Image (cartoon, rainbow, N blue to C red):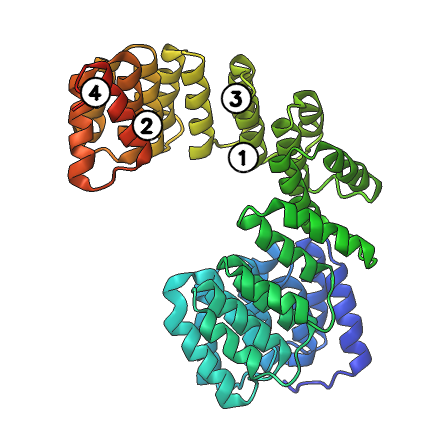
Amino acid sequence: MTQKAITASQTTTLASLARACTTLSQLKQIHAHVLKLHLPGNPSAVGPLLSAAATSSDPSFFSYARSVFEHLRCLSTFMYNTMIRGHVQSGSPVTAVSLYPDMLRSGVEGNNYTFPPLIKACVFMGLDSKAIGLLVHAQVVKLGYRVDPFVVSALIEFYSSVCDLESARKPFDGSTVRDVVTWTALIDGYGKAGDMENARHLFDEMPERNVISWSAMMAAYSRVSDFKEVLSLFRQMQEVGFEPNESVLVSVLTACAHLGAVTQGLWVHSYAKRVNFISNRILATALVDMYLRCGLADLALSVFHNISDKDAEAWNTMITGVALNGAVVKCLELFKKMIAHGTQPTETTFVALLTACTHAKMTKEGLKLFEEMGNIHGIRPKSEHFACVVDLLARSGMVEEAEKFMEEKIGGLGGADANVWGALLHVCSIYGNVELGNRIWKKLTDMGITDSGTRVLSYNIYKEAGWEN
């Protein structure tokens, strides 16, 4: 069968038709048309189809793209790039990386579009991917793409993700063309590492900024809890004429929540509704958190009820906030609604619920929730959950039961961590349980993990018992 030539206009038409498909059936019809024209092996004909399927958000489209790719005999750089990008988008970074050596074995050479998604795959693979990332970087240098701005930005993000800021700085310093994306990538890297001095220096020095640059700098200050600077930067951004995006508003709302700046938070809410950002679940969740921290539970509930696609984070924010406001019964009702909604609770959910039960001295309900956590929801308790239960029992005057719980669940004092010890030591000081308090203090001392808080608690226990010396 002879391959037919395909014109640029036909390629454009195929690409447009493929991207317009809303169902897999429609995509298959276009593929059938390509087969009928005897073009199945022509990269120019199959490429647009493969690109539309591989980068679609529909999992069935990507599955079809994989099937098409596996049966092709004539593979191009564009096709490999498309599948690497598709695997990254679908959450399969290891498969994405494995395509590159396959690409080389097939005699197909990568180009500047190959490496950004390939490096992104290394980012998604986490700290263990540093060796692989170094090999990819070597290929970048070998093929002469080390000054490509998109490759440079990807390398900066990769080295930042593996906590190697020194290596992240090198491609930036060696780049001849530094665009706003490159500058922002390094600012974000320094910001995530908590290096505010370098992050701010770059931000002040960059020749031009966009809203993402402002967002990265504000997020950096938010991470180190410098919320006043977040709001200061927001005012500066508005003064120079930039309109905030959703990420900027989330940082601003987080700052408002911690500073109690409810007036600024109300403005953000109004602005978000005006520009139709309110449908953004992360932004809406930040609004809920801000209102709850400012004591405006009714407004928080109003925003929460209007989140159409509530995830665990949204539910946890609402449950935690209501618990902190002392409405324990409402907190438990929300949890029941969360389960009825079909949302899987998380470790954070149960920390909030157990803490709420502790402060309300609802011991029976708290113990029941702790059992359901593992038996029904399949969540393995961690140290903070054990600490909550110990606190729950001890604050209800059940100090012996708290110690028994520690013995049965975590091997007594020897198996517990500082969170559990601290919870029980606090209650020993309330109820004057000198014997147990003394054992805990000795254990903490032996482990070398005492702090000023535990010293004060222990001193109070001994003082009440007349052991001041």
Task: Tell me how far mark 4 sits from mark 1, CA to CA.
Answer: 44 Å
Q: Can residue 102 be seen in this view?
A: no
Q: What element carries label 2?
A: helix
Q: Earlier in the sequence, mark 2 or mark 4?
A: 2
Q: Earlier in the sequence, mark 1 or mark 2?
A: 1
Task: Tell me how far mark 3 sits from mark 2, CA to CA.
Answer: 17 Å
Residue 291 image point, x, y percent:
66, 29
Amino acid marked by disc 4: Tyr
- Mark carried by residue 312: 1
Q: Nearer the viewer, mark 4 or mark 3?
A: 4
For mark 4, does the 10 Å Cα neighbourhood hold few (<14), some (14 to 19), or many (20 or more) residues?
many
Q: In this view, does 105 lie above or below 375?
A: below
Q: Is mark 4 on a helix, strand or loop?
A: helix
Q: In this view, does 106 lie to the left or right of 260?
A: left
Residue 294 image point, x, y percent:
65, 28
Amino acid marked by disc 1: Ala
Q: Is residue 277 above or below residue 399?
A: below
Residue plotted at (63% across, 62% down): 55
For label 3, the residue is 323
Q: Is mark 1 on a helix, strand or loop?
A: helix
Q: Which of marks 4 and 1 is nearer the N terminus?
A: 1
